[in-house]
Amino acid sequence: MQIIYTSGNYKRTIVKSIVAIVLGLVLVLWPTEVLNYTVKIIGAVFCVTGIISFLVSMRDQDERSARGLTSFNGIGSIILGILLWSMADFFTNMLMYLLGFILIVAGIGQLVMLTSARKFGHIAPLSYVYPVIILLAGLIVFANPFSAKEGIITFFGAVTIFYGITDLINHYKVNQLRKETHEAEQQQKMGGGEIEDAEYEEIE
């Protein structure tokens, strides 16, 4: 798979990495609050959207077929919201699997980016260590989601901060290599290739 790396990619990466660092800090500083409220907030959102959908379907009584579908979706959202709220512990365990999966995907994504960036030049071996650490951290979270959940949230937050910082470092290095490669190509085009010595005759 070939990845086209541009300055736009680098700018988006800066934003993404900063968001990851901020999110990681929130998870590290307030793991209990995040754990207690995340699933319940999602459940409340489903309940509210379900109630709104149901009320809208009851209001639009003329369009019976659409009303039936909207009413069904609304009731389904309400039921799911109630389940999320009342069985928060169960769904929190499922959330642990999701967090582990996110780290695994993030680690693989960094590895793919670094592998594709080799066309710009040499990539330091240390750069490959960062995504491997993130990948292993994801496997740890994914394999043991039923341990102390606050500890897992804190661990995930710390790894998220690490991911944000290392992603910035790796993309900065790749962006520098990209610039150097682009400048070398431009100089080669302007120079028109190598300069060859021409034969000449000396006039006395």
Image (cartoon, helix red, strand yellow):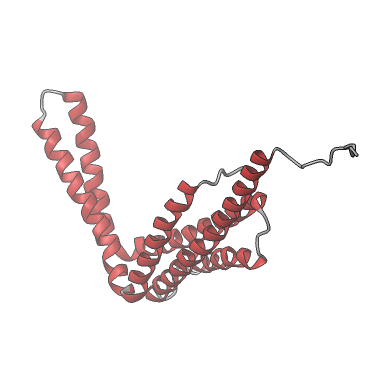
Relative to 93, residue 70 above or below? above
Q: Where is residue 86 in the image (x, y as percent from the top left)?
A: 25, 61
Q: Along the line of sight, which residue is nearer the eye, 132 or 54?
A: 132
Q: Residue at x 46, y 47 (%)?
A: 8
Q: Position of residue 1 (x, y in %)?
A: 62, 43
Q: Quadrant of residue 131?
A: bottom right
Instruction: Please identify the residue farthest to the left as the structure is shown.
Output: 59
Q: Position of residue 76 (x, y in %)?
A: 25, 43
Q: Can residue 108 be seen in this view?
A: no
Q: Can residue 76 be seen in this view?
A: yes
Q: Position of residue 188 (x, y in %)?
A: 68, 43
Instruction: Please identify the residue farthest to the front as the structure is shown.
Output: 204
> Is 120 placed left or right of 47 in the picture?
right
Q: Residue at x 68, y 58 (%)?
A: 122
- Please state the total of marks drawn on the protein image: 0
Quarter containing the C terminus: top right
Q: Which residue is drawn at 52% across and 60% down?
A: 172
Q: Along the line of sight, which residue is nearer the eye, 131 or 183?
A: 183
Q: Which residue is drawn at 57% across and 51% down?
A: 179
Relative to 54, residue 64 above or below? above
> Is 71 placed left or right of 145 in the picture?
left
Relative to 146, residue 41 above or below? above
